[in-house]
């Protein structure tokens, strides 16, 4: 995939700007607080439909304005595409793909494929399991719409099942309803878990390989918390688990098993990264995961996503910086920095100052 241009109107600190990109390395340079991260944010929103910082639409619109627009032109294997996102303080955002209105956010996901990395992505290693599930869900949804539909379905059944568990504390009659929702939940849970296991099985060897190339002497392992058991399907296993947990669930009033509670584990040289690795090692792992995601998505859709790297260089030592940049030239990469590092590689320079291209 290749982004040709992004036009921003009242987006963050951009009043009106149009930015053009080349293939390969694009350095977005400028002093602090000029709009470099904001530019990458606008592209991420065009891909996933929401801000990587989880900002509300209202916060994204330029201070003092009531509407904002992102207009992005890009090229895929299927031809030229255009996405327009209209943000409005009063109304829900609206989206157009190739000038046609998009009714659901699910239609947008997967249209423009990007892989995003910023210092915040360290949360993938350091923070709560929910951050790792979000990583799995956003990554897989980029190339598998069914997975996204199953997630939405699962979430709906889960909320209904939790409501029943809660009401059972006073209304015993609802036990029949619970018997109805549990197999439905398990059926969707199985699909989600199978897909996540397959994704990790594809990602793990690629990540281990890239990690070795960048660190030279460390081994990286990635494991999903749910393990397949020989001779028993996930459905049968979860059914057993749910029977064992029922009493506890009735007391607590919510569902205690399923993919909404699963997690990922990263190990360096056999040790859990969250507890034992240095900040630098954790940052490298998070970056490696994103670089390997580029390859996994390529294997799935037949083209590389656009790589968005926010503020990564300042955090890496020189040899790691150089190896990262060599990776990045293989794709269209948009990389923000305060100073462009010395390099023999070809690149395009985009200088940003106070919400404008210099
Ligand atoms: N809704 C908004 N309207 C106008 N300016 C904003 C808005 N949100 C953030 N900003 C400004 O954008 C600037 C930060 O831009 P950012 O892209 O993060 O900078 P950097 O170039 O350092 O990456 C800050 O000065 C901030 O005040
Ligand atoms: Mg920034």
Image (cartoon, rainbow, N blue to C red):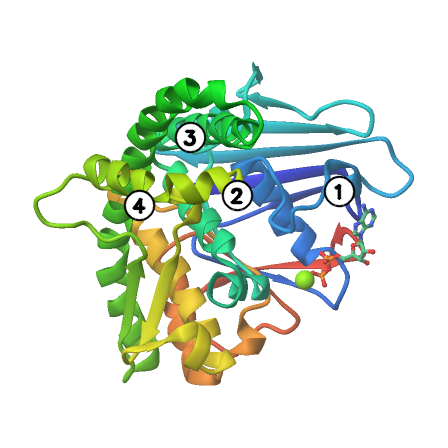
- First-in-chain label (1 vs 2): 1
Where is residue 299, by image quadrant? top left
Residue for badge 3 = 154
Residue shown at 56% from the left, 27% from the top:
167
Q: Position of residue 270 (x, y in %)?
A: 27, 78
Per the model, the C-alpha gap separating discs 1 and 2 is 39 Å
Residue for badge 2 = 252
Q: Using residue 84 as the reference point, say whether residue 56 is left or right of it.
A: right
Residue for badge 4 = 196
Mark 1 beta carbon near ligand 1 (under 8 Å): yes
Residue shown at 8% from the left, 44% from the top:
231
Is residue 29 placed above or below 190 in the rendered structure? below
Do tag 4 and tag 1 residues touch (Cβ < 8 Å)?
A: no
Can you tell which of label 4 and label 2 is closer to the viewer? 2
Marking on residue 340: none
Q: Residues within 10 Å of mark 3 (few under 14, many from 20)?
A: many
Give whichever of 159, 108 is nearer the camera: 159
Q: Position of residue 219 (x, y in %)?
A: 26, 77
């Amino acid at each position: 995939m290749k982004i040709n241009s992004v036009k921003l109107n009242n987006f963050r600190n951009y009043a009106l700007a149009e930015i053009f990109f080349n293939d390969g390395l694009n350095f977005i340079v400028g002093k602090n607080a000029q709009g470099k991260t904001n530019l990458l944010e606008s592209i991420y929103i065009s891909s996933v439909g929401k801000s990587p910082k989880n900002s509300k639409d209202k916060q994204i619109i330029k201070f003092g304005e009531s509407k904002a627009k992102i207009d992005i032109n890009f090229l895929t294997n299927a031809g030229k595409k255009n996405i327009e996102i209209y943000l409005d303080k009063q109304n829900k955002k609206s989206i157009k793909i190739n000038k046609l209105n998009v009714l659901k956010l699910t239609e947008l996901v997967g249209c423009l494929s990007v892989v995003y990395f910023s210092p915040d992505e360290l949360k993938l290693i350091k923070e709560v399991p929910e951050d790792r599930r979000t990583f799995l869900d956003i990554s897989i949804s980029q190339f598998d719409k069914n997975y996204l539909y199953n997630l939405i379905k699962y979430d709906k059944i889960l909320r209904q099942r939790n409501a029943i568990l809660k009401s059972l504390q006073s209304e015993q009659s609802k036990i029949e309803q619970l018997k109805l929702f549990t197999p439905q939940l398990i059926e969707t849970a199985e699909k989600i878990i199978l897909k996540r296991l397959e994704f990790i099985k594809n990602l793990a060897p690629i990540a281990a390989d890239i990690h070795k190339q960048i660190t030279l002497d460390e081994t990286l392992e990635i494991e999903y918390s749910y393990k397949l058991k020989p001779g028993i399907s996930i459905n049968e296993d979860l059914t057993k688990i749910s029977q064992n947990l029922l009493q506890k669930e009735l007391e607590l009033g919510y569902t205690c098993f399923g993919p909404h509670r699963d997690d990922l584990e990263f190990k360096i040289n056999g040790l859990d990264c969250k507890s034992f690795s240095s900040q630098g090692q954790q940052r490298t792992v998070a970056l490696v995961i994103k670089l390997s995601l580029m390859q996994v998505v390529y294997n799935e859709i037949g083209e590389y996503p656009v790589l968005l790297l926010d503020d990564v260089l300042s955090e890496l030592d020189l040899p790691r910086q150089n190896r990262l940049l060599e990776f990045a030239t293989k794709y269209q990469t948009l990389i923000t920095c305060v100073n462009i590092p010395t390099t023999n590689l070809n690149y395009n320079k985009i200088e940003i100052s106070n919400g404008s291209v210099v």
